Image (cartoon, grey):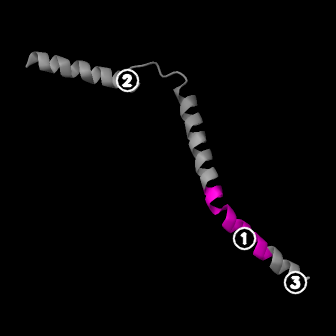
Amino acid sequence: MKKLKELYEKFCFMLLRSFGVCRNEKGQTLVEYALLLVLIAIVVYLMVKGTGKQVNCVYSQINSALGNVN
């Protein structure tokens, strides 16, 4: 049973180390901000791509309506 406990503790330590809990975290915030910025850019791009034609159609209707007023 003692061997199993030691093996479990080693496994937990290696797992924590692999997720960065036991490592030096210098520069980690910069990487996190960069990843967050990339994620936001991808979301904005997909939103514009998905709604671009609809927005263009609305602007065209507004432009046509304003052109008929003059």
Question: Quick check: 60 left or right of 48?
Answer: right
Element under disc 2: helix
- Residue 32 spot, x, y in % from top left: 53, 33
Tags 3 and 2 touching, CB below 8 Å: no
Picture quadrant of residue 27:
top right
Point 56% across, 30% down: residue: 31
* Residue that mark 2 sits on: 18
Q: Is residue 30 above or below residue 42?
A: above
Element under disc 1: helix
Q: Residue furthest right?
A: 70
* Residue that mark 3 sits on: 69
- Residue 53 spot, x, y in % from top left: 68, 65
Q: Nearer the viewer, mark 2 or mark 1?
A: 1
Q: Is residue 40 found inside the magenta-colored segment of the image?
A: no
Q: Is residue 7 above or below residue 46?
A: above
Picture quadrant of residue 70:
bottom right
* Residue that mark 1 sits on: 57
Q: Nearer the viewer, mark 3 or mark 1?
A: 1
Tags 2 and 1 touching, CB below 8 Å: no
